[in-house]
Amino acid sequence: MGLFDRIKKTESSKDTKAAESARYYSDAISYLRYDRYNDALWSLDKAITADPNNAPAWNDKGRILARFGRRDEAVLCYDKAIELRPTSAVYYHNKGDTLASFGENEAADICFTEALKHEPDNVVYLTSHARMLAAAKNYKQADAVMTRVCELEPRAPEHWFNRATMLYEAGKLEDAIACYSAVIEIAPGHAVSYFNCGNAYRELENYEKAVYYYDRALKYDRTMTGAMNNKGLSLSLLGKHLEAYDCFRRVLIALPKAPDIWYNKGYELLMLGEKSDAVEAFNTALSHCTEKDAELITRIQTEKHKAETA
């Protein structure tokens, strides 16, 4: 056999292995569509055995291992994928996502920053970077990044929502309301944005506005017990105790064993002069409390004593 024949045979063998690896990788992707992770992992191992330079297979193996909680093995897979394709931004991002899921935010952000070096305008990578900045309480930088995201895709409600949430966490309630309002403008039925606007207005002690936004949230999602409960709290602070009582009564239909809601109901009954019914509600609240509810138990007992001695 001549030199060229040997070269030709070697190249043919490589092509065969690459084709085999591609076939197993395709099988893995099919399994992943149906959440058959163990089958997908088996196929990925076969793909990597056939061709150790199959970077996508290493990457997807890392994703599955991370899902199984196998952090160290997942990171090794991502590192191998990155070694094979050092300019592939998605591998850095996936590694960062895994590290973030294990609470390693600083290391995760290094990966997200590296991904952005290769794709600086990728809104997914920018949002992940902003998330890490916010987790580190670098809210000003996080908002600057999210502002960029919203400029790149101004009609994507999820970007405005993410930015609003970060602003809310930073205590910039009016700015958060402006961003939630942008979500509502783009997606008028976004119940959670109405709910969060209501919460922001409640913290700003603008209870009338809070009630308006809770009502809007409930218009689009009648099962949102949090909106109904917070509407009741706002109405109570406005002195509208009968309407507040009705809110808590409705919440208890969905959450009949929630001690804090029974307390809220009891308080409104007390404000309405229904002392015996208030005591009964407070007793029900106490019956549903656990040792974790020490602060709530104290409040219930205080109001119950008022009802009994009034």
Image (cartoon, rainbow, N blue to C red):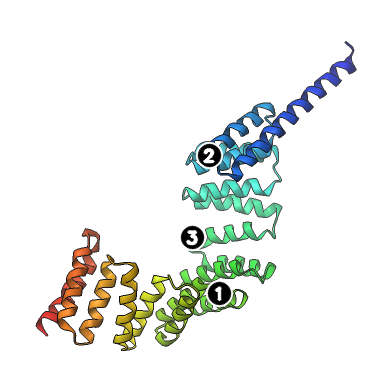
Q: Are marks 2 and 1 in contact (CB under 8 Å)?
A: no
Is residue 167 depicted above or below 113 in this figure? below
In this rendering, position of residue 173 left or right of residue 305: right
Residue at mark 3? 135
Q: Earlier in the sequence, mark 2 or mark 1?
A: 2
Is residue 185 depicted above or below 257 in this figure? below
The local secondary structure at tag 1 comes to: loop
Front of the two marks 3 and 1: 1
Residue at mark 1? 189
Pick the residue in front: 208 or 223: 223
Q: Which residue sits at x=79%, y=27%?
A: 15
| Figure quadrant of the C terminus | bottom left
Front of the two marks 2 and 1: 1
The local secondary structure at tag 2 comes to: helix
Q: Residues within 10 Å of mark 2 (few under 14, many from 20)?
A: many
| Figure quadrant of the N terminus | top right
Q: Are marks 2 and 3 in contact (CB under 8 Å)?
A: no
Q: CA distance from mark 3 to mark 1?
A: 29 Å
In the orientation shown, which residue stands out farthest toward the top? 1
Q: Are marks 3 and 1 in contact (CB under 8 Å)?
A: no
Front of the two marks 2 and 3: 2
Q: Which residue sits at x=40%, y=80%?
A: 202
Residue at mark 2? 65
Q: Earlier in the sequence, mark 2 or mark 3?
A: 2
Is residue 272 depicted above or below 195 in this figure? below
The local secondary structure at tag 3 comes to: helix
Q: Position of residue 150 (x, y in %)?
A: 64, 69
Q: Position of residue 165 (x, y in %)?
A: 51, 69
In this rendering, position of residue 32 left or right of residue 211: right
In this rendering, position of residue 7 left or right of residue 34: right
In the orientation shown, which residue stands out farthest toward the bottom? 239
